[in-house]
Amino acid sequence: IGQIYYYRSEFDKSIEYFKKYFEVNKKSKSPRAVAGAANNIASAFMELKRFDDALQYYVQAMRIYDSLNIKLGVAIIKDNIGSLFLEKKQYNDALLYHTDALRIFEELGSQSRSCVCLRNIGLTHSRLNNPELAINFLNRSLAIALKLKQKETQKDVYEALSDVYQQTKNFEKAFSNY
């Protein structure tokens, strides 16, 4: 039910149901489900721009995944925390979390997750005014997105590349990536 409210952008209601699911799974001693619920709660808090609440639940989820040695879960949460710091304009923290997540995704051979993470690192470098690094990471992301036919990521990367080229006053490339 929490997912339904989430997709309807009724985030307060989704949090209410995710928290119920969270508590039920805590009582039934199902840590993996607790971690998933914590991640869902954090994501809903992110949509509400309640970053401190989101971070609290992301950290809970990450600790559980780490204790269960679920590396993919840890990496996903680290990427989410990186996105949280990116939203908060804490770019150096964002870069640390995204970079660590990318290392794990690549270790696991998860190209689809690496693709999104590379885009996030590119966006972070763009905000840090490191256009060369931003372009490098965005192009790496784009190559994977094209290979995997990830249309949404392709769109996001082209838009980000356009923004970076506009930052560098390379308007021809900005236009060609728009």
Image (spheres, rainbow, N blue to C red):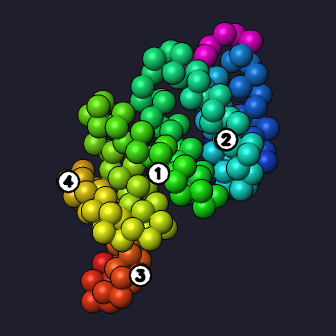
> Which residue is depicted at the point 71% across and 26% down?
21
What residue is drawn where x is 63% and y is 32%?
Answer: 59
Residue 153, quarter of the rendered image: bottom left
Callout 2 crowding tier (Cα within 10 Å): few <14, some 14–19, many ≥20:
many
- Residue 167: which numbered mark, if any? 3
Question: Mark 3: which amino acid?
Answer: Gln
Reply yes or no: does residue 107 show up in magenta: no
Tell me how many marks there are: 4
Mark 4 / mark 3, whichever is N-terminal: 4
Q: From mark 3 to mark 1, how far is it between C-alphas?
A: 20 Å
Three-letter amino acid code at the position of disc 2: Leu
Q: On the image, numbered disc 1 is attached to which residue? A: 95
| 3D distance between C-alphas at marks 4 and 3 | 27 Å
Which label number is shown at residue 55? Answer: 2
**Compared to 159, does 86 lie above or below?**
above
Image-quadrant location for residue 131? bottom left
User: Sequence-wise, which precedes: disc 2 or disc 4?
Assistant: 2
Image location (x, y in percent) of residue 125: 42, 62
Q: Nearer the viewer, residue 22 or 92?
A: 92
Of tags 2 and 4, the one toward the viewer is 2
Q: Callout 4: helix, strand or loop?
A: helix
- Closer to the eye: label 1 or 2: 1
Residue 170 visible somewhere in the drawing: yes
Question: Which segment is the magenta one?
Answer: 27-32
As helix, strand or loop, the secondary structure at mark 2 comes to helix
Task: Look at 61% across and 16% down and name the residue there.
Answer: 31
| Amino acid type at image mark 4 | Lys
Q: Quadrant of the C terminus?
A: bottom left
Left or right: where 154 falls relative to 47: left
Amino acid tagged 1: Leu
